[in-house]
Amino acid sequence: MKNKTLLLATLLLGSLSLLAIDYQSLFNRQIHLKENYVLVEDAGLKKIVIPFHFNKTTTEFDPKQAMLIDPRKIRDIEYIYYENNSKSHQEKLNNERIDNLLSLFGPKLKHVDAAAFSTIILSNEHVSRTQFTGFVITTEMSDRDNKLLLEEMLSKTDSKKRKATFTLDTLEEYGYVLPHLHQNLKAKELNVVAATFARNKDWKNKLIVVDVTGSMTPYLCQYLLWLNLNFNPHEIQNYVFFNDGNDNKGFNKKLIGSTGGLYFTQNNNGYNNIEKTIKTAMLNGNGGDRPENNVEALLAGELKYKNTNDVIMIADNNASPRDLALVKKLKKPVHIILCGVRNNMINMDYLNLAYKTKGTVHTIEDDLTGLIKKKEGDTFTFLGEKYTIKNGEIITLESLAIKG
């Protein structure tokens, strides 16, 4: 019996090692070199920190915490480490640490979008033992918690009861310093929606299609505060709020074009009804997996509100549409307001959605309005990044140079 148990354990460890190699290739898809790592708390998102001892593969992370994580809510997994001078030793450390991550989370990780994995290698100019080593997993908060956060922000009170999504309670024994920032819920960038509408007052008879999944909470709040101040019940303005499928939709039930979780209302129903509809859509949501059902929501809005002049979509720059194959069915240009843009990095899927519908793209900083005039081979600059049109798609000039 003892031999059988030992054989089973050996086989399990062997399979984990093979899986670690597979997952390491996912982490290696995005590699960033940084002076240090700063954990940034985002409203609507929660950070799970899994530290490892310096130059070791051991962690005291409580496995019970892993069991509390809903795999559908995982948005990002970052692996952070200070590079060892020996590449072979570092590779061994990486594989064994990923083995440990897999033993903690197991099947949960198979649901995570490949694009969510990344590696951050820290500068060796710092005292290595003070540099954080380990994994940081970003998940969406529960729909109920996001609804409560929205209500708190709308009430314009800063709750002293709100707990930080990250604490330093486990890092002292590791000897690490892990700087972290709380998100400023009144930051300028959260006003991107209101700022864009203020710059584009010529939009009329509007259909506004809005992503109401967790990470959008602070942007939705700022928009609602602005809308309440500027509300005109006589203005023709229709809404579709989408949550990427109600709670009864599992991964295997999210079919392109019929994911569901769409909620409709109009200006003539009053501001309170609009706010109530958003909260209902949030509470019934089942986002979590990164792709969203943006185009499905756009098509539903076009079908229901046929007299629309301008279609505006308020979207999460960090979550691509799952249903871009349906773009050709759209009949009107789409003006896309992007939330969560950092370091001027625009999601290429939204650039191409705007281009293929002869629409526009908007951020807190600027409006990209000339896409309708662009043709094959043209180049243009937006937010400091250079783009070109190749084979009917917008791509960066940098990616073209790499491929060339």
Image (cartoon, rainbow, N blue to C red):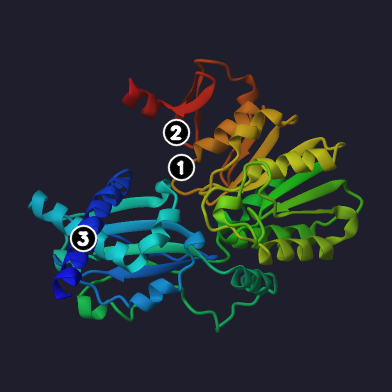
Q: In this figure, which residue is indicated by the disc labeled 2? A: 385
Q: Secondary structure at mark 2?
A: strand
Q: Quadrant of residue 232?
A: bottom right
Q: CA distance from mark 1 to mark 3?
A: 43 Å
Q: Amino acid at mark 3?
A: Leu
Residue that lies at the very extreme toward the front in this rendered image: 1
Image quarter (top left, top right, bottom left or bottom right) of the C terminus: top left
Q: Which mark is residue 291?
A: none
The residue indicated by pointer 3 is: 11
Q: Residue at x 55, y 61 (%)?
A: 187
Callout 3: helix, strand or loop? Answer: helix
- Say whether residue 390 is visible: yes
For disc 1, the marked residue is 345
The answer for how far apart the CA atoms under marks 3 and 2 are is: 49 Å
- Give how far across and how far down residue 93 sits, in percent: 16, 59
Mark 1 vs mark 3, foreground winner is 3
Which residue appears at 53% of the width and 48% of the height?
Answer: 319
